[in-house]
Amino acid sequence: MTLEIVDYIPCGFEYVSGSQAWSVGSNQATTVCAGLLTPGQSKTMRIDLRVIPCATPNAWTNYAEVRAMEDESGVNIGSQDIDSTPDNNNGNDDGGTPDSANDDYVDGNGKSAGGAPGDNGTATDEDDHDPELVPVFDLALTKVLNTAAPYTYGQTHNFTITVYNQGNVTATNILLNDYIPAGYTFATNNGWTGSAPTITRTIAGPLAPGASTTVSLDLTFVRIVTPTTGKSWVNYAEIASGTRRSGISGI
Ligand SMILES: [Ca+2]
Ligand SMILES: [Ca+2]
Ligand SMILES: [Ca+2]
Ligand SMILES: [Ca+2]
């Protein structure tokens, strides 16, 4: 009797280990559930995955599925499962939406009519396949000077700051700091407040996963008597804090 399980490893994870041997191929790991699985019984297997960067949507949604099943005589009985079809195809299973009603649901009938992969239904959910979404909160920032050279003292320089949501969690209340060097002066503009050397601006959001947003900042370019190489007119911005939509703070 062989019962095989497949874990579909998305690009946001890499395989580490497990509670038993996993055979790791490209984007899939398979394992054999040892021994008999008798009526009414359940068994637990563990797979350890490490979170890694990936820009692809659903990078951190991890699915597992029953890949194959045999009876005690070694006969393939996958087609006899009355409400699901074991295989190693992650795209053909009704239901399977993370954090929906059919996540962790095992009483659906994936062979009944009306369901579709990725829907929220429980009645038509395929019960040998289930997702788990690992929330990753990841913001990034870039800053560019828009004003073209040559520069003259007293001139207004305009910067664009872009904040990217590279995770899979919606971000709100993103607090930006801008660190004003000696070679610039600041007067309140474009939602920026405070005074040198650190001014702040809040992006209310929500900033959805995969989305980016820009803010503008004007500073006045001024002369300083004794410039410091690499510092006097180098202007940094940084994300100070952000909030997941659930209200949890983090970056
Ligand atoms: Ca089933
Ligand atoms: Ca499948
Ligand atoms: Ca399911
Ligand atoms: Ca789940």
Image: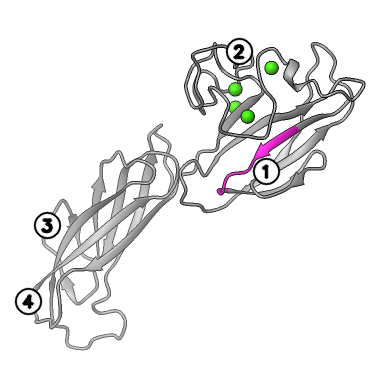
Q: Nearer the viewer, mark 2 or mark 3?
A: 2
Q: Position of residue 162 (x, y in %)?
A: 28, 56
Sequence-first tag of 4 and 3? 4
Left/right of residue 19 with respect to residue 218 in the rendered view: right
* First-in-chain label (1 vs 4): 1
User: Which mark is first along the chain, 1 or 2?
Assistant: 1
| Ligand 2 under 8 Å from disc 1 Cβ | no
Q: Give the CA distance from mark 2 to mark 1.
A: 25 Å
* Most foreground residue, 137 or 90: 90
Q: What is the magenta range?
A: 5-12
Image marks 1 and 4: residues in contact by CB distance under 8 Å: no
Residue 185: percent from left, percent from top? 14, 69
Name the amino acid type tagged 2.
Asn
Determine which residue is flagged by label 3: 188
Q: Nearer the viewer, residue 104 or 246?
A: 104
Q: Which residue is mark 1?
A: 28
Ligand 4 within 8 angstroms of badge 3 C-beta: no
- How far is disc 4 from disc 3 in space, using C-alphas? 16 Å
Residue wearing tag 4: 154
Give the label, 1 or 4, closer to the camera.
Answer: 1
Give the amino acid type for the residue marked by disc 4 in the picture.
Gly
